[in-house]
Amino acid sequence: MGVTLADILAARATIRGIADATPLIPSPFMSAQAGHEFLMKMETMQPIGAFKLRGAVNAVFNLPADTGGVTCCSTGNHGRGVAYAARARGMRAVICMSRLVPQAKVEGIRALGAEVRIVGTSQDEAMHESRRLCAEEGLADISPFDDPRVIAGQGTIGLEMIEARPDLRTLLVPLSGGGLAAGVAVAARAINPGIRVIGITMDRGAAMAASIAAGHPVEVPEYPSLADSLGGGIGLQNRLSFPLCRDLLDNVVLVTEDEIRHAMQVLYYEDRMVAEGGSVVGLAAVLSGKVALTGPTATILTGRNLDMATFTRAVTGQDVTLGDLTLKGKAYAA
């Protein structure tokens, strides 16, 4: 299938010392709500504040020494990971993003010394610019999801989760381009073939969900979302993450913007944590009753690189405007 447990074990050795293991902690509130122990993998604690560092480091550090530089398209966190890894190797990095990427993420990438190109209003347009840079300037493209070394790097998360808790029955994995879900599923199923792996994403502009439903990669419109890190296409020529997600995920569940906001409020008020909307979709799926648990369950808090003004409006119950959609104010109630 292109990525194996051996690849993930090799990735763990490569990223050690840069993107190390993160805690897997219980949420007493979510456990009480779900009726089963509910745990959270704290990828918010990575040096760049997101899990994407793992795959980026594994990919960049496996490039030949004479590589002139790297480029990628990104909704924010992957670009930050590539910029961090490139700086560690002394390489030039050019990160291509659409105008939908929050300014806080753009500024975070520039702070790491990378060049930023803002192109169009979709990740597909940013992807075209990244490919142009590869063809015309000889940069190495680091795909955010359709790269075996990126997938293997993200797979180290699944490895750590299963090693820490071999009794886990279900993994709820935020789903975007599928690099995380594919890597986690490969690792988890290699160790425990009976484990249930469910991809969770937002209900507007979910490219991987639409592609699995269609049976082949498709393009979808992109919309502003509280889960902006889950936006973007998967590429019509997707070679790895699509077939892996199609074959290894037990189900894909869609959650609404209102359900995502409620999950952000729960994480903030009950667990005293700040995280992106894309991080909390696993909580949203359980809280909304869209996923029923059968035993110990874990999800991944994928990142914390968010626009704090939007976050503050969301968790304090104010109106939140997302393009043509306005979430009416709703104060937190457990």
Image: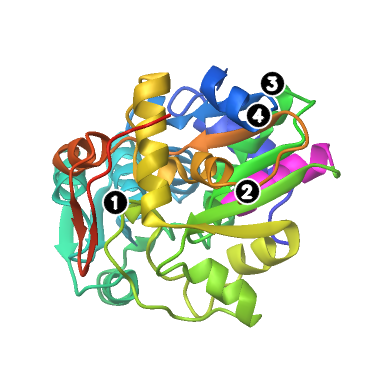
Res 77 seen here? yes
Q: Is residue 11 left or right of residue 63?
A: right
Secondary structure beneath label 2? helix
Magenta segment, which residues?
Answer: 181-192
Q: Amino acid at mark 1?
A: Gly
Gap in angstroms between the C-alphas marked 4 and 3: 5 Å
Q: Which disc is residue 231 wearing?
A: none
Residue placed under numbered mark 4 in the picture: 161
Residue closest to the eye, 26 or 249: 26
Q: Does 140 appear above or below 330?
A: below
Tell us which disc is closer to us: 2 or 4. Answer: 4
Q: Residue at x 48, y 48 (%)?
A: 59
Q: Amino acid at mark 3?
A: Ala
Specify which label sits upstream in the sequence, 4 or 1. Answer: 1
To which quarter of the image does residue 202 belong? bottom left
Residue placed under numbered mark 1 in the picture: 76
Gap in angstroms between the C-alphas marked 2 and 1: 20 Å
Specify which label sits upstream in the sequence, 2 or 1. Answer: 1
Q: Amino acid at mark 4?
A: Met
Q: Which disc is residue 183 wearing?
A: 2
Gap in angstroms between the C-alphas marked 1 and 3: 29 Å
Residue placed under numbered mark 3 in the picture: 164
